[in-house]
Image: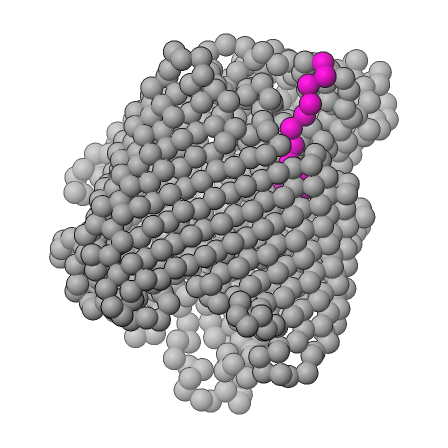
Amino acid sequence: MRMKINFSILFILTIQFLHAQKKNETFNYHIKKTDAPIQIDGMLDETWNKTETASDFFMVLPFDTGKASVKTEVKMCYDKENMYITAICHFKPGQPYMVESLKKDFIFGKNDNFLLFMDPFDDQTNGFSFGSNAAGAPWDGIMYEGGKVDLNWDNKWQSAVRYYEDKWVWEAAIPFKTIRYKKGITTWGINFSRLDITAAEKSSWAPVPRQFPTATLAYTGQLIWDEAPPTPGANVSLIPYLLSGTTKNFETNSPGTFKKQIGIDAKVAVTSSLNLDLTLNPDFSQVEVDKQVTNLDRYELFFPEKRQFFLENGDQFSNFGYSTIRPFFSRRIGLNAPIQAGARLSGKLDKNWRLGAMNMQTSRVPEARLASQNYSVLALQRRVFSRSNIGFMFVNRDQILHPDEKDPIFQTNPYNRNIGFEYNLASSNNMWTGKSIFLKSFSKSAGVKNWIQASNIQYSSKKWLASWQHEYVGKDYMADVGYVPRKNYIKLAQGVTRIFFSKNQNITSHSLKLESFSFFTPTMRNTDNTTYMAYTVTKRNQSTYTQWVSYDFVELLQPFDPTNFGKGLLPKGSKHRWNATGSEFISKPQKLFTYGFSTRFGGYYANGSRTYISTDFGYRFQPYLSTALSTSFNQIIMPSPWNKTIFWLIGPKIDVTFTNRLFFTTYIQYNNQLKNINMNARFQWRYKPASDLYLVYTDNYYPSPFNVKNRALVLKFNYWWNL
C-alpha cells in the first residue's frame, strides 16, 4: 500500500508542474483611482461613466458552452479609504425578482444574486466574498480551500440595491481596513458571479467549468490596479458589549438569576495582511441555536462553530484534517466553562506563508469540579506549486489547578497535546484535489498507538467524478480539543460518478453514482461496510430527483442501543446486515412555495426495519417574510425489548426582515427523542455596520405534560468602534 501511496504522490506532483499556468489570466479588469465622492445608493451617477466595464459574462449553468443570456455589467474604482463596486443586473422588463428575505448571508441557490469573489494575494486559495440578493440583503464571507465561503465571518462595509423595471443595481463600498492584503501587490484575483433563478441561469465574468462553483479561485481573472492599493494605516477596532439577562431553572425550582456582563473584543491589524484578535470576557448568547437531528448514530455528532471570534481565518485551524479527523475543534473551548480571555494572530505573512496562533483561557467551575484550562494552537502553512500547500499544527491543552483543587478528580487528564502535518493538493485547473495527513497525540499514560495517517485524492471533470480515501486511527490517539468520534480502525473508501448531458430541453443532466466504504480492525477484520448506488436527474428548472439503493453490514464493537432511547443494548460482537432504498427531491426555486422530501425504507439492526421520511416546506412573502417547516419521521420496528419506536422532529422557523438591518427570527424545535420542545426567538437591530442590538428569548419544555424546564431572556448591545 505504501508503494501505491508514494506512486500517487509522485503522479500528483507531476500533474502540478504540468498545470502551473493560471487558467483565466487573460481576463483583466483595470481599476482606477477616483477623487469624486461616491454615494452608496444604487444610483448610477457620472463617476461610473469614467470606469472600465466588465460584461459579456459566460454561462456556467445549465451549460458552460457559451455566453450568458442575461446581461450583467460590473464597474469598479477606489479612493484612499474604500474600494467601490457596482453591478447592473439586467432582466426582462416586468420580471419579478426571487429572494427569500432581506436577511444577510442568504442561501445562494434560493435568491437572485450577484457576488464578488476576491483573491487579494492572487494565490488561488484564500480570499473574500461580498454581494447581495436582488432585494438588498448583504452577503459577506471569508474564502478558504480555493473556493469555499464561510458566511459566519462579519465585518464593516456598506451596500445598497435599487430596483428598476428592467434591472436591479447593487452598489457597495468595501473599506481597505475590512479586507487583508499584502502591501505593494498590484494584481489580485477576481471574479463576478450572477444567478438569475427565474431564467435558471448562473454566469460568471471569467469562465468557470460547470462542475465547479463560481467561487472557485483557480478560475479568477485579474484585477489590475493603476497603482498599489493604499495602505490602510492605523487599523484598530474595539468592539465592546453590554449584556443583561435573567434565567430560571424550573426543574430545580431554584430562584431566577439576574446576569449582567461586560466584555470587549479588539481587532488590530499588525500588517495589512496579518490580524490580531483579542477578547476579554466574551459572550455568545446571540448565536443561533443548533438545528437538532434525530440521533441514531453510534458516535458523537458534529455541530459547526458559529462564534464570531473563532471564524476569521478559521479554516487554518478548523479544516486541518478531515471531517471526522479534526485535531482542533474550537467548540471544545468554553463548552462547560466560561472563557476568560483569548488572543489570536492570523493571516498572511506573504504570498506563500500563512500563520495562525491562538491562546484561550477558561475559568474554573468548582461546583462542576472543572479546573481552569489553557488552550494553545499554532498553525503554519506554506504554499507549494500553483495552488497546493503544506501545513503544520500544534494543539495543546493544559489544566491549571487552583490551590484548593487537590482532589484527584481534577488530575485525571492534566494535559493533551497534538502535533500534525498535512499536504493539501489542488491542481491549477482544480480537477485534481486531495490531502494527506499525519497526526500524533501526547497525553499522560498514553499508549504507543497514538497516531493517525490518512490520505485521499479526487478527480473532477465534466463527465466523471472519482475519489479514493484511506484512514488509520490508532486506539490510543486522543484529541481533547478535537473531533475524532471513532478510533482504532482502518477505513477504505472509493466512489465514482458518471454524468450524462441530456438533449431533452427539460433535463440538463442525469448521473449515476457508485460508492463504497469499509471499516476494518487494525488486523484487517471487516467490521462495517456500506455500498451505495444512486441515480440523479437534474431538470432545466433546477429541480432535482435522486433514487438510491444501499447495502449495509455492521459488526458492533461495543454494546449499542439502536434507538438511542434507553430501551436496551445489542451485544458487542453481534453482526447485522440489511438493504435499503430511498429517494430525494428538491423543487425548483423559482416559486414562492418551495418544497423537498427525503425517504428511506429498508432493514435495520437485529433483522428489524426502519422507515424514514423528512420534508421541507417554505413560503416567502417577498422580501419581508420567509417561513419554513422541517419535519422528520422515523419508525423503527425491532424485536423485544425495542418493539416499535417512533421519533418525530418538527422545526417551524419564521424570519421577518423589516429592513436589511432589522430582523426577527423565531425557531421552534420539537424532538421527542430528547423529550424536549425548544423555542428561540431573536430580535436583531443592526443600527450601524457590524454594530448590533440583540434581544434573545429561549424556552425549553417537556412535550407531555407541557411543563417548562428552563427559560432565559437576554438583552445585548455591541458597538464596532474604529480608532
**Residue nearer the viewer, 206 or 575:** 575
Q: Is residue 646 left or right of residue 619?
A: left
* Magenta-tinted stretch: 93-105
Q: Position of residue 194 (x, y in %)?
A: 60, 23
Residue 82 lies within the magenta run: no
User: Residue at point 64% right, 84% down?
Assistant: 254
User: Residue at point 32% right, 70% down?
Assistant: 567
Q: Is residue 718 visible?
A: no
Q: Position of residue 700 (x, y in %)?
A: 59, 67
The image quarter containing residue 102 is top right
Q: Position of residue 198 (x, y in %)?
A: 60, 22
Quadrant, the N terminus: top left
**Residue nearer the viewer, 349 or 680:** 680
Eyeballing the image, is 675 above or below 258?
above
The image quarter containing residue 606 is bottom left
Q: Is residue 260 visible?
A: yes
Q: Is residue 404 left or right of residue 116?
A: left
Q: Position of residue 432 (x, y in %)?
A: 35, 29
